[in-house]
Amino acid sequence: MSNIKSYDSIAVIGPTASGKTKLAVQLAYKLHGQIISVDSRMVFKGMDIGTGKDLAEYTHQNRPIIYHMIDLVEPWEDYHIYQFQQDFKKAFGSIQCIGKTPILAGGSGLYLEAVIQDFEYTSIPSNKEKRGALEELSLLALQHQFQLMDIHPYKEIADLATKKRAIRAIEILDYLLTNPEFALPISKPIRPFIIGLNPPLELRRNRIIDRLHSRIKEGLITEVEDLLEKGVTKERLSFFGLEYKWVVTFLEGQISKTEMVTHLGIAIQQFSKRQMTYFRKMEKSGLKIHWISNPSEIDLLMPMLASFEGINTNCNY
């Protein structure tokens, strides 16, 4: 088991309908933490049912749990991953500043990677010519080559854990050394203890279908109609995900309500499978994920998590 003192936060990930929010709320209650949503869609206002915000769940034992990164912008506004990173850092820093535990929760693997793996340097272009030569080297040789490069603040925070990351680190450092005018704040990537929820496949499928029917009863179709009336285009709604795409198709009269539910249920299950594929890819790239099949298994980790000492009361954010 990993040394909990090496972490500064906790992340709860998993495919859709796996129970992430409930588990994150439980952890926030027990560990006196606050939740940061790591989801690409929950930042948009008025998109509650289709994105599964489940705001009513942010209460445990009659105590409200504070959350961040939800309802930040209007659905017709652009919100890119770089903006997400900046808002995330502010939320993360504000939680640490008051001595609380940041608990990340979400099913968006890309957005989780964006705040874990220092995506500040995504604007730095790849060097295809040098990459070819670097890919021929071993991880140890790449790490050695990186250490031989000139001194730069980036060297203190670079991730050299895997061959892929080491190549990118060399690429970034080479660019920074040859382009000193390139200025970005040097910040140490966060180090969350990652808990993955992966219920049995059949249970997950049943939950997806049950939740879909519940959301339709709660007013998913009305939510989409309201967004259209507010001026959000059909094209943009379709961009926001499966629920909005299929409801729009239904509202346009292209399919019946029964067909919408059937197709949407299948599409969400396929999406769930893709989420798990992405999480497995994250593991292969070097991220450690502690998998459990249901929230009750968190009790096995609680003795260790209860002594969580990763909080840094640094108020410079």
Image: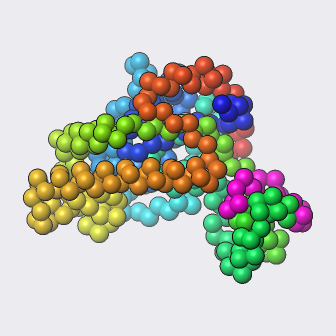
Residue 102 showing in the rendered view: no
Q: Nearer the viewer, residue 255 or 293?
A: 293
Residue 155 showing in the rendered view: yes
Highlighted range, magenta: 146-165
Q: Nearer the viewer, residue 228 or 15?
A: 15
Q: Quadrant of the N terminus?
A: top right
> Which residue occupies 11% across, 54% down?
257
Q: From the viewer's perspective, is 242 left or right of 175? A: left
Q: From the viewer's perspective, is 291 left or right of 137? A: left
Farthest bottom residue?
Answer: 129
Total of numbered circles in the picture?
0
> Which residue occupies 70% across, 56% down?
162
Q: Is residue 285 covered in magenta?
A: no
Q: From the viewer's perspective, is 202 left or right of 123? A: left
At which x and y percent is residue 235? 29, 69
> Which residue occupies 58% across, 55% down?
114
Question: Is 127 above or below relative to 203?
Answer: below
